[in-house]
Amino acid sequence: MNEILAEINALKREKNAVILSHYYMPPELQVLENVGGVADFIGDSLGLSVEATRVKAENIVFCGVAFMAETAKILNPAKKVFMPDIEAGCSLASSITAKDVKELKQRHPGIPVIAYVNTYAETKAECDICCTSRNALRIAASFDSEELIFVPDIYMGQNLQQSLTAQTGKKLILWHGRCEVHEQFTQSSMSALELMYPAAEILMHWEVPLETVSASFQKTKGVLGSTNDIIKYVGQSPAHQFILASECDLGATLKGTYPDKEFITPCIKCPHMKKNTLQNTLQALRAIGTNDAMKYEIDLPADIMQRAYLPIKRMMDFV
Ligand code: SF4
């Protein structure tokens, strides 16, 4: 283990590369180099997008899934972006295509389209603005239009609709995509955990189904929000015990950040995120500058990069 960490860190310097790592990575990819790991930055999708614009190194190794690495490439086109496993996808991103968005726009002419950042670049290219779970509400509220199309996550859309109705009365037209991780937090599984741990507060991601959200927050305190909201909330809450209704390995980040608090983490893992390992991160780094590099490198058509940039850039104004 120590040898592989040392080789990755040596290769980062030799190949002028940095590692950006998502909070859903296996724990060994979530440790910063300055405390014995290999990552240069760890974050949620918005944090990683911001960081991608600041990277000075020539090469980015992105430990996450493809839509995130695409966003890093679009925001920083002069850099080469590599993924340890180029096949690391996402059930939400693959639930909608550019053609689907074009058809939605034909059915609802003139209605602005907000794309959750968990979409592929060619889908983003058809949309007016992107958002993450951190800024979705602010972005939706900023439009003058009384109706908005929100794609692709139906659960996040329904949760967003609840907050929007309370704040603005705007109506969302939704798509039917689902995150295969967060949809597994059912009302019955959460209420069983709430009975087992009556003193615990709930940390719930916006991608969890609305009926689970409504049932849980009727009786238990906690936060419904983005990954970043969840991390911040724990720091501000006087509670000692928390039930995490989000990707299992976020529990590693929480435990590392708040070692005195206890986290109940029903272990539902994203199979796409878990395609990233120390071993294939090492292989991607070794490949940089060789004929094998293309197996790991994000390559997008120039016109898609150009058209997807605008909705992403508009989202960045809401950081
Ligand atoms: S956790 Fe859900 S939204 Fe995130 S990459 Fe996995 S399937 Fe996609």
Image (tube, rainbow, N blue to C red):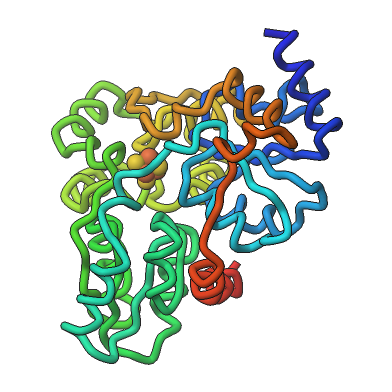
Q: Quadrant of the N terminus?
A: top right
Residue 204 seen in this snapshot: no
Vertical arrangement, residue 273 with respect to residue 267, above or below:
below
* Pick the front one: 300 or 23: 300
Q: Position of residue 314 (x, y in %)?
A: 55, 76
Q: Quadrant of residue 191?
A: top left
The correct choice, above or below, for 221 with respect to 191 in the image is below
Q: How many numbered marks have been drawn onto this rendered protein structure?
A: 0
Q: Residue at coordinates 36% horizontally, 29% vertically from top-left?
A: 271
Q: Position of residue 111 (x, y in %)?
A: 28, 86
Task: Tell me residue 14's x, y (percent).
Answer: 85, 31
Residue ID at (60%, 54%)? 72
Query: Looking at the picture, how far across and down is residue 153, in whole percent?
Result: 28, 57
At x 61% / y 56%, what residue is drawn? 73
Q: In screen coordinates, is 296 left or right of 155? A: right
- Residue at point 59%, 23% (across, down): 260
In the image, residue 6 above or below residue 46: above
Farthest residue toward the right? Answer: 14
The answer to which of 199 and 155 lies nearer the viewer is 155
User: Can you see residue 277?
Assistant: yes
The answer to whether residue 85 is above or below residue 175 is above
Q: In this orientation, which residue lies closer to the viewer: 101 or 242?
A: 101
Classify residue 137 by image quadrant.
Answer: bottom left
Which quadrant of the rendered structure holds the C terminus?
bottom right
Q: Quadrant of ligand 1?
A: top left
Q: Which residue appears farthest toward the front when viewing the image?
A: 291
Q: Is residue 234 left or right of residue 157?
A: right
